Amino acid sequence: MSKVMWIVIAMILWVFVCAWWFCNIKGQCSEKPLAKADVQKNVPAKVVREPAPIPEPVPEPAPELAPIPEPVPEPAPEPAPIPEPVPEPKPAFICTDYLKGTLKLGQASNTSVDATKVEEFLNQYEGASLAVDGVYGAADEQAVRSFQQKYSQSVLEPLGLAGPTGHVLGYTRAQINKLYCQYKEAE
């Protein structure tokens, strides 16, 4: 059915609903007239309410329908691409001091933990080939001297030193910690 026909049917139904409501809910339907005898005797009249007759809807002629065309098969949709898994975000690297102690050749206060860390750092990040044995020996001292020479501007010059010492103290330790953090953040 066309849109106009639906609107007409809706309007007719609305009229019937309003008429029913007006008569049954509001009580405004026509009342039967009282008999003359009831009026003369001063007897209260009985009010009889009858519902308003509802006319039957007149069927409208059905419009001619055009033949329904055969459905044209649609091409099969391409499968949705499988989304790439989203890697979980890498937790932020919090840098703490990698190396905390001091190292000097032959010093009794050298710890194997600090010596091992220096050996591992110089092997991994500076290309040294030290034995990781936890003993700060002559080969370790020579690798530290090369490291100090390479970073002399931040290790030796602040102290006014002309050449490397081979000792892992304040500025050398700070440079190792700084580089270690940078390397770890980049990984």
Image (spheres, rainbow, N blue to C red):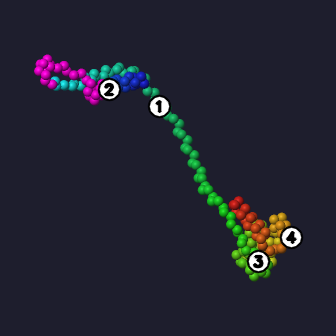
Q: Secondary structure at mark 3?
A: loop
What's the residue type where badge 3 is placed?
A: Tyr
Distance of mark 1 from mark 4, alpha carbons?
91 Å
Asked if labels 3 and 2 touch by Cβ distance under 8 angstroms, the answer is no
Name the residue tied to disc 4. 161
Is residue 67 positioned above or below 100 on the image?
Answer: above
Q: Is residue 171 left or right of residue 57?
A: right
State the residue lying farthest toward the right. Answer: 162
> At 40% from the left edge and 21% from the top edge, which residue is drawn?
64
- The answer to which quarter of the image holds residue 12 is top left
State the residue position of label 3: 136
Dividing the picture into quarters, in which one does residue 36 lie? top left
The residues colored magenta run: 19-44
| Residue 37 in magenta stretch | yes
Sequence-wise, which precedes: disc 4 or disc 2?
2
Tell me the distance, in whole angstroms, between the alpha carbons under discs 2 and 3: 103 Å
Q: For the residues carrying marks 3 and 1, which lies nearer the camera in this image?
A: 3
Q: Residues within 10 Å of mark 1 (few under 14, many from 20)?
A: few
In three-dimensional space, the C-alpha distance between marks 4 and 2, rounded to whole angstroms, equals 106 Å
Q: Looking at numbered disc 2 in the image, what kind of residue is underneath it? A: Cys
